Amino acid sequence: MGHLTAALARIWAIVWRVLAFFLVWGVLVAVFLVPLGPRLKVWEQVHPLRMRLYADFAGAVTMLIATWLATRFLDRRPFVTIGLAPRRLSSHLALGAMAGMAWIGISLGMAWMGGWLTYRPGQVFSWAALLGVGMALVLNVLTQQLILCGYVLQTIRARAGVPLAMVLASAMFVGLHAGAFKGSWLPAVNVFVAGFLFCVAYQLTGQLWFPIGMHVVWNFTLGPMLGLTVSGSQRLGSGWRVFDLAGPAQFTGGAFGLEGGLIVTASTCLMLVVVVVTLRRRSAAAR
């Protein structure tokens, strides 16, 4: 009976903290968005990039505030322990960016070797559009990583252990993208594995900068730079397409884009091994 009572107490400690965290975040988001409702609707039609920048800015700022409030008043620990230590920013961000470039390079290389990726010459770039979409993307990724590897994962980890925390956080990451799956199971599997990869990168470094760098490079290269579909949506595009992706849907992802196919299943699993080996060697060398 004592073990059951202790287990229930741990579950309740997780549940009420997570619910309080999301409740606070929801209230803060409403404060940023509701008063500007009519103006945001106009921006969505006339200035979509402005609308996107504001929405992603509001999401990131409110998530940072909600995380600070949760760490400060619920856990009574310094905000920096969430994994945003400034002294680790440059090295871990750069390492994550390199991992992201390897990840996208392997994926596109596999599609190219399969004959499913075709270059489209004559594309006209807009550096202003690329910069604007890139800024919005960085803010969006920061929000996603604070949800995935931030307060929720750390709350579960402290009371239920690392494996369960990473599995539940990755499942929540799938939930964030659920609207794009449209009944397909492989995109959900790929998103889960990608979420698990980010969680592993965070667990091994103790910082969010590594998964942030990897996530930003993946999304930025696939969407704004190359104009390919990201998570079933063209929303991240900048108005041009450098490559056409066409081939068997089970490999290329079909309507969901490259992230919904076996190519990304394989490349993500490979990157999971590479990240674990690299970070462990790096940690051993630093001792």
Image (cartoon, rainbow, N blue to C red):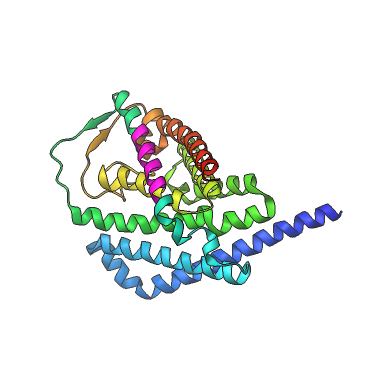
The magenta stretch is 93-107
Does the segment drawn in magenta span residue 103?
yes
Q: Compared with residue 158, is residue 27 higher up or lower down, i.e. above or below?
A: below
Q: Is residue 179 placed above or below 188 in the rendered structure?
A: below
Point 31% across, 62% down: residue: 53
- Residue found 42% across the figure and 63% down from its top: 60
Was residue 249 drawn as part of the magenta stretch in this picture? no
Dividing the picture into quarters, in which one does residue 31 lie? bottom left
User: Looking at this rendering, what residue extends furthest in the right direction?
Assistant: 1
Question: Within the image, what quadrant is residue 260 found in?
Answer: top left
Q: Is residue 26 above or below residue 218?
A: below
Main SS category, magenta section: helix
Tell me what residue is drawn at x 17 percent, y 52 percent: 126
Q: Nearer the viewer, residue 145 or 82?
A: 82
Q: Specify the quadrant that holds the C terminus.
A: top right
Q: Residue drawn 35% across and 46% down?
A: 217
Residue 48 position within the rendered picture, expressed as x and y whole percent measured from the top left? 26, 60
Give residue 161's position: percent from left, percent from top. Answer: 67, 49
- With 138 as the anchor, is 127 left or right in this view? left
Q: Position of residue 80 (x, y in %)?
A: 52, 64
> Which quadrant does the N terminus fall into?
bottom right
Q: Nearer the viewer, residue 99 or 217?
A: 99
Specify the farthest residue to the top.
Answer: 114
Q: How many marks?
A: 0
Spot occupied by residue 109 in the image (x, y as percentages of width and height)? 32, 30
